Image (spheres, rainbow, N blue to C red):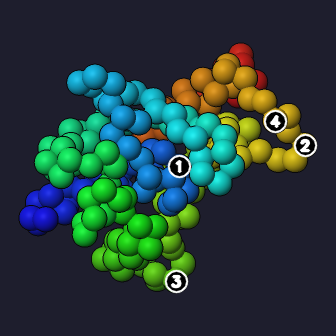
């Protein structure tokens, strides 16, 4: 795989890890059809989590859409259905172990202690920002596809939509660090 495609793959992987808030096992198993509808990229995607067997939705930011558009030609050239195919076997997806090595390399490149960060750090990044900026634990639980034992097992479509709208307001890549998202008023979120 040429150098440019490797950088494009990693940017797409990074952006999707942040946006999706998925566990490593679900992130590496993403398929092209999870994110594309016809010729356009979905604003929101839904997958069934491997661990919980429950659906989880996530937003796809503009930065991620740009990376996906750049990455798609490389994926299509290999003819696989996985968004992140394994390099040796294009019929399989990137392994969670290889994803962990990539994250480890990213952490080392920016000078952080690699023992303190991993794939789960990627999952928690945006969720932690949402909680820090809104204080809305229920929205974070919905976005991560988790729930406490005291919560009802059914999450309403309204709750999911509100949680996704909150996530869409949180910009991690903003150049204006003073900008705070508005809390969603009148919904209890």
Left or right of 56? Residue 75 is: left
Q: Which mark is residue 61?
A: none
Q: Is residue 19 shown left or right of residue 128?
A: left
- CA–CA distance in space, label 3 to label 4: 35 Å
Q: Position of residue 56 (x, y in %)?
A: 59, 38
Q: How many numbered circles does the render carry?
A: 4
Q: Of circles 3 and 1, which is in front?
A: 1
- Sequence-wise, the earlier of marks 3 and 4 is 3
20 shown above or below 87: above
Q: What residue is pinned by disc 2?
A: 150
Identify the residue under disc 1.
21
Question: What x and y, as percent, mark residue 155?
Answer: 74, 29
Question: Camera-side residue: 2 or 143?
Answer: 2
Position of residue 86 relative to residue 74, above or below, is: below
Secondary structure under badge 4?
A: loop
**Residue at the spot 19% in from the left edge and 63% down from the top edge:** 6
Q: Which mark is residue 115?
A: 3
Tell me the crowding category of disc 1: few under 14, some 14 to 19, or many 20 or more residues within 10 angstroms, Cα based: many
The answer to whether residue 27 of the structure is visible from this angle is: yes
């Amino acid at each position: 795989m040429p150098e440019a495609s490797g950088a494009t793959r990693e940017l797409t992987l990074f952006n999707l890890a942040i946006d999706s808030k998925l566990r490593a096992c679900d992130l590496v198993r993403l398929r092209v059809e999870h994110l594309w509808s016809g010729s356009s990229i979905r604003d929101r995607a839904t997958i069934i989590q491997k661990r919980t067997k429950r659906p989880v939705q996530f937003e796809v930011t503009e930065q991620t859409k740009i990376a996906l558009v750049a990455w798609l030609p490389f994926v299509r050239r290999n003819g696989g259905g996985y968004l992140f195919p394994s390099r040796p076997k294009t019929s399989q997806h990137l392994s969670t172990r290889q994803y962990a090595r990539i994250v480890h390399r990213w952490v080392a490149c920016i000078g952080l202690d690699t023992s303190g960060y991993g794939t789960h750090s990627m999952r928690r990044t945006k969720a932690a920002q949402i909680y820090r900026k809104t204080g809305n634990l229920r929205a974070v639980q919905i976005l991560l596809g988790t729930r406490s034992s005291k919560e009802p097992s059914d999450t309403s479509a309204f709750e999911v939509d509100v949680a996704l709208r909150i996530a869409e307001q949180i910009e991690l890549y903003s150049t204006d660090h003073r900008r705070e998202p508005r809390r969603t008023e009148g919904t209890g979120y």
